[in-house]
Image (cartoon, rainbow, N blue to C red):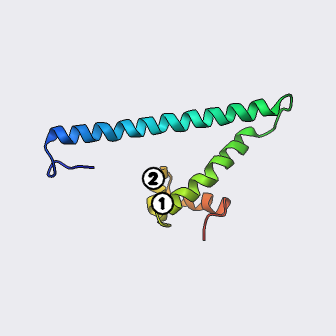
Amino acid sequence: MPTLQDNNIKDVITSTTQTSKKHVNSKAVFHDCVCSELDKYLKDLGEYTPNNIHQLFIGEVEAPLFKAIMEHTNGNQSMAAQMLGLNRGTLRKKLKQYNVLN
């Protein structure tokens, strides 16, 4: 991300806007992907009514999320907790829950 020392204000605004658009587009793509896969899952159920679908879904999303974030931060739990918006104690609990701790 450029700083005011590196570029003039116009360049900083342009870069920030482009970064924000990428983030928004990324969120939209992720949202669409989740919705699409959830629709497929529910259609595949047919007449069957599952129990605890929320717990199933959260577990299937959280486990790879925590693994990916820990890899991205090279195992730095403080940085991972900050990225996830969790306190470090909650992160450690989740890492243990999903066997992500080394």
- The quarter in which the C terminus is drawn is bottom right
Residue at which label 1 appears: 72
Mark 2: amino acid: Met
User: Does the rendering let one see residue 90?
Assistant: no
Q: CA distance from mark 1 to mark 2?
A: 10 Å
Q: Is 10 displayed left or right of 86 in the figure?
A: left
Question: Is label 1 in a helix, a strand or a loop?
Answer: helix
**Which residue is rendered at x = 86% and y = 32% of the image?**
48
**Rendered view: 64 above or below 57:** below
Q: Is 83 displayed left or right of 91 in the figure?
A: left
Q: Which mark is residue 4?
A: none
Residue neighbourhood size for the residue with mark 1, other residues' Cα within 10 Å, grouped as few (<14), some (14–19), many (≥20):
few
**Which residue is rendered at x = 41% and y = 40% of the image?**
23
Residue at which label 2 appears: 83
**Rendered view: 84 above or below 89:** above
Residue neighbourhood size for the residue with mark 2, other residues' Cα within 10 Å, grouped as few (<14), some (14–19), many (≥20):
few
Residue 91 coordinates in the image, percent (x, y): 55, 58
Residue 41 coordinates in the image, percent (x, y): 74, 35
Q: Is 17 displayed left or right of 4 in the figure?
A: right
User: Does the rendering let one see residue 14?
Assistant: yes
**Which residue is rendered at x = 73% and y = 44% of the image?**
56
Lower position in the chain sequence, tag 1 or tag 2 = 1
**Rendered view: 68 above or below 102:** above
Q: Is 96 displayed left or right of 26 in the figure?
A: right
Q: Could you tell me if the residues under marks 1 and 2 are in contact, i.e. CB atoms within 8 Å?
A: yes
Mark 1: amino acid: His
Question: Is label 2 in a helix, a strand or a loop?
Answer: helix
Residue 26 coordinates in the image, percent (x, y): 46, 39
Q: Nearer the viewer, mark 1 or mark 2?
A: 1
